[in-house]
Amino acid sequence: MLYPIAIRPGDEQHAWGVDVPDIPGCFSAGEDLDDAMAMAREAIEGHLEILAEDCARIPVATPVSAHVSNPEYEGCIWALVDIDITRYLGKAEKLNITLPAILLNRIDDYVKHHPEQKSRSGFLASAALKVLQQA
């Protein structure tokens, strides 16, 4: 999931600040732009880990365009941090499902040509998450 981050430029006296608008209370800082983005990843992962431990819902990432007009983020630099949220959704469970052969072949072909999906199960989990996020 691509979480937008709002980065406030730093100076000689101040670190670069980072807010994660889609995850309330999630913020970080860094010595420079690269460090700020790396620290943002750590902050997001830490927040999601706590939410998972509490069995709380993982916040959905919204497009940057949903935040840029917010005066709170005026003057910020925007970036996206890619987080694999499946590790925060609980222990994997095995199940037996039935799918039409043509659909299964299309899924397998897609996964073969899109290594970011990693597996048929990864593809199905990703597709289910997209549908559930829109609900």
Image: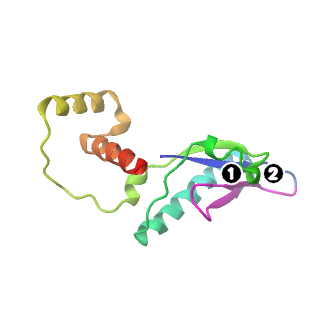
Residue 36 — which label?
1
- Residue 34 against residue 110 in the figure, above or below: below
- Residue type at mark 1: give it: Ala
Dot placed on the residue nearer the N-terminal end, 1 or 2:
2
The residue that disc 2 covers is 10
Disc 2 packing (10 Å; few <14; some 14–19; many ≥20):
some
Is label 1 in a helix, a strand or a loop? helix
Q: Is residue 52 left or right of residue 46?
A: left
Q: Is residue 37 left or right of residue 125?
A: right
Disc 1 packing (10 Å; few <14; some 14–19; many ≥20):
many
Q: Position of residue 128 (x, y in %)?
A: 32, 47
**Residue 25 falls within the magenta-colored stretch:** yes
Q: Which region is colored magenta?
A: 13-29
Q: Position of residue 73 (x, y in %)?
A: 74, 50
Residue lying at the far front of the rendered structure: 135
- Label 1 – label 2 distance at C-alpha: 10 Å
Q: Is residue 114 left or right of residue 20?
A: left
Residue lying at the far bottom of the rendered structure: 54
Q: Give the total number of marks visible in the rendering.
A: 2
**Residue 15 falls within the magenta-colored stretch:** yes
Q: Are marks 1 and 2 in contact (CB under 8 Å)?
A: yes
Nearer-the-camera pick, 70 or 15: 70
- Residue 107 against residue 28 in the figure, above or below: above
Q: Position of residue 25 (x, y in %)?
A: 62, 65
Q: Position of residue 132 (x, y in %)?
A: 37, 50
Q: Residue at x 24, y 33 (%)?
A: 107
Residue 12 — which label?
none
Is label 2 in a helix, a strand or a loop? loop
Nearer-the-camera pick, 35 or 112: 112
- Residue type at mark 2: give it: Gly
Q: Residue at x 81, y 51 (%)?
A: 10
- Residue 30 against residue 113 in the figure, above or below: below
